[in-house]
Image (tube, grey):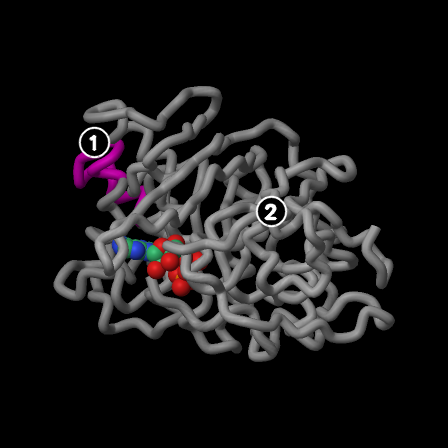
């Protein structure tokens, strides 16, 4: 899936520089979905294997919104799709509500899919232009929950009302709506089967900045009112700061940091996270740190470096970083980082 380039100074003006975001809701602390050593491989252009996910360990807690960030190509969409069982992992497991869903097939997979839904990036490309909105929104409810047209009708009407379009929108077709309205339709469709977990993949990136805030607010209202858990994938750190309770950072198919939103934005622990934040002037961490420019290209995922995958671009890399891959380890309660020499939050020096 294509998306705009990595976190940059062009990050959404509204979300990045707007008023202080609301206090994050305290997650309830029970994992809803958990990936363990999850790996996904694609066939590369030269015929070799590209490891798009490398042994990803990640818990998403019931009721939270976890923001997933990182440069284009680091594996964010692949992780979202693998969790939804749209992409088959090469190895590893996915637990959903304590049930191993990694290899579910047939009816059991179809039933589970009703609980796992996706809001897509492109509200134009993801809606079938020939179908009525009511049918589009009803589709997951009918397919995954086996609802009849008559059963789906009232649910769809109520959803269209809740997303601010009104039930009468159901009689119309996608071309009659603007980009923001189509994304409201996309959200209604994702919620139709009453899922427990939603992946929003660059859900506001294709929208005008003025519309982004409205859609973000709608998403957070829906998540709160329905007690949903959301993985919010975005290259735009300003948007993530607005909506996420916790933040996970990916680099070359690995999770390299997980932290609460406030810890992350006030003092990231991984040098890569700091460089990402530093590229957005309004989010740059603490004055004395100044600007750290991320140098060099993202390595070819088919030919990753030895040792720490970030060592070729890390301004602090030492001998150990060039030979030994760091583990994802806990450095403070609720805070994990994959770095031999994590930054001490709030300091200019390595700790
Ligand atoms: N269908 C595919 N076949 C081969 N390689 C793929 C395929 N889909 C993704 N990749 C590769 O897997 C890696 C991860 O891609 P992915 O789309 O998950 O990253 P991303 O962080 O979501 O990037 P973007 O923000 O650009 O969507 C990239 O190197 C990408 O080129």
Q: Give the alpha-carbon distance from disc 1 to disc 2, as whole Å.
A: 53 Å
**Mark 1: few/some/many CA within 10 Å (<14, 14-19, 20+):** some
261 on left or right of 116 = right
**Residue at 66% of width from left, 74% of height from top?**
293
Q: Is residue 349 left or right of residue 66?
A: right
Could you say where residue 40 lies in the image, as x and y percent from the top left?
A: 36, 42
- Find out whether the residues at labels 1 and 2 contact each other: C-beta distance under 8 Å: no
Write down the region rendered in magenta: 141-156
Q: Main secondary structure of the magenta part?
A: helix
Q: Does residue 21 sit above or below 342 in this rendering?
A: below
Residue holding disc 2 = 323
Secondary structure of the residue carrying numbered label 2: helix
Please state which of residues 123 and 84 is positioned toward the viewer in this rendering: 84
Q: Quadrant of residue 64?
A: top right
Determine the residue positioned at 41% across, 30% down: 92
The percent coordinates of residue 56 (x first, y second) are: 49, 39
Q: Quadrant of the N terminus?
A: bottom left
Quadrant location of residue 123? Answer: bottom left
Magenta span includes 153: yes
Answer whether residue 251 is magenta in the image.
no
- Marks 1 and 2: which is nearer the front? 2
The answer to whether any part of residue 310 appears in the image is: yes
Q: Earlier in the sequence, mark 1 or mark 2?
A: 1
Mark 2 C-beta closer than 8 Å to ligand 1 = no
Q: Is residue 164 visible?
A: no
Residue 146, which numbered label?
Answer: 1
């Amino acid at each position: 899936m294509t998306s705009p380039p990595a976190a940059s100074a062009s990050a959404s003006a509204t979300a990045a520089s707007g008023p202080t975001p609301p206090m994050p809701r305290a997650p309830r602390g029970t994992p809803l979905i958990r990936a363990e050593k999850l790996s996904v491989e694609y066939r590369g252009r030269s015929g070799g294997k590209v490891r798009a996910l490398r042994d990803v360990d990640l818990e998403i807690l019931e009721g939270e919104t976890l923001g997933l960030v990182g440069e284009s190509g680091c594996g964010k969409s692949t992780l979202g799709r693998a969790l939804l069982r749209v992409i088959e992992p090469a190895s590893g497991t996915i637990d959903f509500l304590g049930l191993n869903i990694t290899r579910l097939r047939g009816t059991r997979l179809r039933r589970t899919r009703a609980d796992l839904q996706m809001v897509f990036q492109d509200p134009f490309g993801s809606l079938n232009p020939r179908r009525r909105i009511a049918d589009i929104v009803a589709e997951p409810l009918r397919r995954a929950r086996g609802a009849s047209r008559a059963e789906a009708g009232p649910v769809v009407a109520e959803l269209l009302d809740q997303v601010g379009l009104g039930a009468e929108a159901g009689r119309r077709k996608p071309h009659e709506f603007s980009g923001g309205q189509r994304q409201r339709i996309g959200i209604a469709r994702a919620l139709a089967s009453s899922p427990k977990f939603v992946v929003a993949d660059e859900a506001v990136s294709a929208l005008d900045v003025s519309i982004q805030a409205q859609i973000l607010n709608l998403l957070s209202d829906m998540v709160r009112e329905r007690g949903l858990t959301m993985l919010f994938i975005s290259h735009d750190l300003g948007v993530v700061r607005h909506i996420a309770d916790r933040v996970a950072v990916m680099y070359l198919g690995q999770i390299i940091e997980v932290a609460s939103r406030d810890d992350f934005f006030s003092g990231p622990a991984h040098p890569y996270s700091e460089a990402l934040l530093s590229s957005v002037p309004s989010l740059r961490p603490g004055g004395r740190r100044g600007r750290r420019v991320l140098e060099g290209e993202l390595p070819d995922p088919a030919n990753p470096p030895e040792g720490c995958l970030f060592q070729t671009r890390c301004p602090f890399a030492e001998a150990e970083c060039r030979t030994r891959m760091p583990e994802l380890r806990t450095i403070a309660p609720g805070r994990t980082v994959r770095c031999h020499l994590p930054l001490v939050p709030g300091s200019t020096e390595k700790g």
